[in-house]
Image (tube, rainbow, N blue to C red):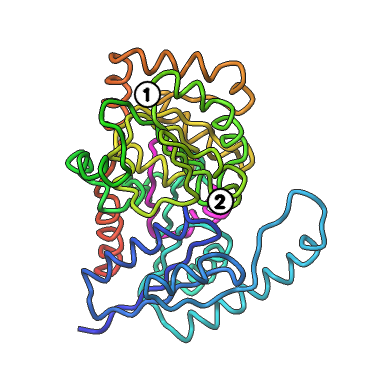
Amino acid sequence: MTTKKFIISGGGTGGHIYPAIAIANELKNKFPDAEFLFVGAKDKMEMQKVPQAGYKIKGLWIAGLQRKLTLKNALFPFKLLSSLWNSWMILRKFKPDVVIGTGGFASGAVLKVANFLKIPTVVQEQNSYPGITNKLLAKKASSICVAYENLERFFPKDKIKLTGNPVRQDLIGVETKREEAIAHYNLDESKKTVLILGGSLGARRINQLISKELDFFLENNIQVIWQCGKLYHEQYQSQSSANVQVVSFIDRMDLVYAAADFVISRSGASSVSELCIIGKPTIFIPSPNVAEDHQTKNAKAICDKNGAILIRESELDNEFETIFKDLISNEEKQKELSQNIKKLALPNATKDIVDEIVKLLNR
């Protein structure tokens, strides 16, 4: 049996990198002798994260168009040509059986050239509203793995597979880790815990809100685990107290989810997929600063099925306290949100995506 070869490309944010690594790990379980090569953007975080996960990576000179007129935009045509040429060289040399793209501009270049060379390609779309790169690639892709229903208006219907987004396997069954989690975070068992998630870098507007509302939480007998992000840790760490833990980063997501009774979070694709599996009553505060307002659309897809609560940044000052107070005092509402968000979970996503890749190998 010939050794299988896979090129995986995705990056720019953890939301693209983490699924790419999860897919590689699952493929490695299935094909222990397989060869893997990742392709990313030269100056982005995948250049550190992928080697840390034990895989080789090559970087392309590529970046997206800026919304404002900048010198970077003037360089875009050159970067595009450079990345297409280098993708061609990488693909001709490595000769992969399948190329998998999880989003980001580097994956756009690699999959475009792979389609031209008639190499089977799989697109993994994490959001409820696809980015421009994946929309352009969809027509020629062999298979498109999605995390939300009703994407036929963007992608050819016969290529869509509803798989969900890859999530950390240690999140499955976190309810059994409650005691361990309470001990790990040194929490008071008689109090409810709210978990604040603003992403690895942090969310400025969420941090401002939490800073202002700490007394409100404490008055309502609620303890706080506040992940403020590395950009803001210095600014907010002085607000730590017996009932408020301010951290820049969380390394045990399974335990922090197990400890939480309520979650306040951004609504990036990976976070939403994790929160569906966890099933805790959740308030989404989408970032309004992402391409095509992805986060609001992701949150809306859950809230439209009564699986979470959505508060826009512009409404926080007027509405947050009323909505949060209503949630913590209404057990029926908590139960309903938990049950509904859990119905939307797709815990076997990584395995289902790999099954799609195996089908292409067998064609």
Q: Disc 1 residue type?
A: Lys
Q: Which residue is mark 1?
A: 305
Residue 284 in percent (x, y) is at 47, 31
Numbered range of the magenta stretch: 131-153
Determine the secondary structure under disc 2: loop
Q: Disc 2 residue type?
A: Leu
Mark 2 or 1, closer to the camera? 2
* Residue at position x 50%, y 72% in the image: 39
Farthest-out residue, front: 242
* Residue at position x 82%, y 62% in the image: 71
Residue 264 in percent (x, y) is at 45, 32
What quarter of the picture does the N terminus occupy?
Answer: bottom left
Residue 276 in percent (x, y) is at 33, 37
Q: Residues within 10 Å of mark 1 (few under 14, many from 20)?
A: few
Residue 34 placement: quadrant: bottom left
User: Total number of numbered labels?
Assistant: 2
Q: Residues within 10 Å of mark 2 (few under 14, many from 20)?
A: some
Determine the secondary structure under disc 1: loop
Q: Which residue is mark 2?
A: 201
Residue 135 lies in the magenta-colored region = yes
Q: Earlier in the sequence, mark 2 or mark 1?
A: 2
Residue 75 in percent (x, y) is at 77, 67
Q: Are marks 2 and 1 in contact (CB under 8 Å)?
A: no
In the depicted view, which residue is nearer to us: 309 or 231?
A: 231
Give the spatial CA distance, label 2 vs label 1.
Answer: 29 Å
